[in-house]
Amino acid sequence: MEHEGERTDGWALYEIFIRARAGLDHKHVGSVHATDARMALEHARDVYTRRQEGISIWVVRSADILASDPADADALFEPARDKVYRHPTFYDIPDEVKTL
Amino acid sequence: MSATATASAAPDAAVAAARVRYVLRLADASLVLAQRLGEWIGHAPALEEDLGLANTALDLMGQARLLLGYAGELEGQGRDEDALAFLREEHEFLNPTLVEQPNGDFAHTIVRQFLFDAWQHELYTGLTSSSDERLAAIAAKALKETRYHLSYSSGWVVRLGDGTEESHARMQGALDALWPYTSELVETDELDRKMIAAGVAPPMEPMAAAWSARIDAVLRDATLARPAAAIYRWSGKQGRHSEHLGYLLADMQHLARTYPGATW
């Protein structure tokens, strides 16, 4: 199967996820080219954590990510538009509750 | 001054002078290699490698600044890190000859880096228990950087050594070319002996053995053959350099020498 970003010279694209601080989620920050996962991790460290942006890195081969097709957006996301009752906005929050 | 006081002051002065030279050796190794790695900026095989090599260069530059600053203080003649980096002559640089060797192709750069990282790793590990507390502190900070450098360079050695026929041949060629420069890393000279006796430098044999074992392990993974020991002995750490250092220093120093005291 052909993937976008797949190269024929042994290099591949990796997506980089960085956790900024303990307790936060890993967040997608960009991508790097590398020939293997270890190199991708080192490149991610060198490219994306130069200014103390993170304490943990995940790398994932871009080709291993299955993405939704923008052409399917109507079918996938439109139907949710008129279902406002799915938002938890119909509850009365007692004044005493401060942190919700 | 009594005769006994003179007799005891003379060796102290000799040890103090030796300590300045020893710290300069450490500083110059990092400084010269940083300058070499900087030459890759804008030319590395991939943007990511460009940044990786630059990061390593900046780590080494940081180490050199700490060490040169300390050497200047020890010397006590008012020379700061800039004066020591930019206003010394070629024969006053005490880096091992290995680090001044040209970048060559990527294989040469990586092999040079690996041979040096493996050595610096042992050296800084040993220096963390130096009797010189300032050196021990600098070594402890630098060791964290060196650990990463070593992981980076040994990863590339294995990848390219155990890669394609072309990459294997280039790596073996680079290893054969650079191997003769490694003997001075692990040989003990008069200055080393003085510093080891003073508890400043770690004993050489355990470091040399650990270095050698690591080289063997990585070369085995990389399917590369360890070259035979070379007969000719380089002695950059005593200030006698290959023809390459002069050109490197001309590049590195010309701005500071053309515009003395320039700042930005």
Image (spheres, rainbow, N blue to C red):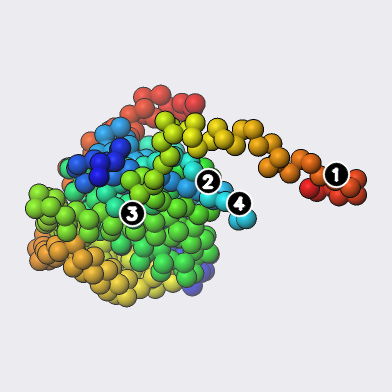
Q: Which amino acid does label 2 sit on?
A: Lys
Residue identified by numbered label 1:
A92
Task: Provide residue B82's location: percent of width, then percent of height.
Answer: 44, 38
Q: Earlier in the sequence, mark 3 or mark 1?
A: 3
Q: Earlier in the sequence, mark 1 or mark 2?
A: 2
Q: Badges 2 and 4: C-beta atoms under 8 Å apart?
A: yes
Badge 4 marks a residue whose secondary structure is loop
Q: Earlier in the sequence, mark 1 or mark 4?
A: 4
Instruction: Say which chain tag 1 marks.
Output: A
Badge 3 marks a residue whose secondary structure is helix
Q: Which amino acid does label 3 sit on?
A: Ala
Do circles 1 and 2 both sit on a common chain? yes
In this view, B114 is above or below B218: above
> Label 2 neighbourhood size at 10 Å, few (<14), some (14-19), many (20+)?
few
Q: Earlier in the sequence, mark 3 or mark 2?
A: 2
| Cα–Cα gap, marks 4 and 3 | 23 Å
| Cα–Cα gap, marks 1 and 2 | 33 Å
| Nearer to us in this view, B99 or B133 | B99
Task: Provide residue B20's location: percent of width, then percent of height.
Answer: 42, 55
- Residue B192 in the figure: left or right of residue A73: left
Q: Which of marks 4 and 3 is nearer the N terminus?
A: 4
| Cα–Cα gap, marks 3 and 1 | 50 Å
Task: Provide residue A75's location: percent of width, then percent of height.
Answer: 49, 35
In this view, B32 is above or below B17: above
Residue identified by numbered label 4:
A24
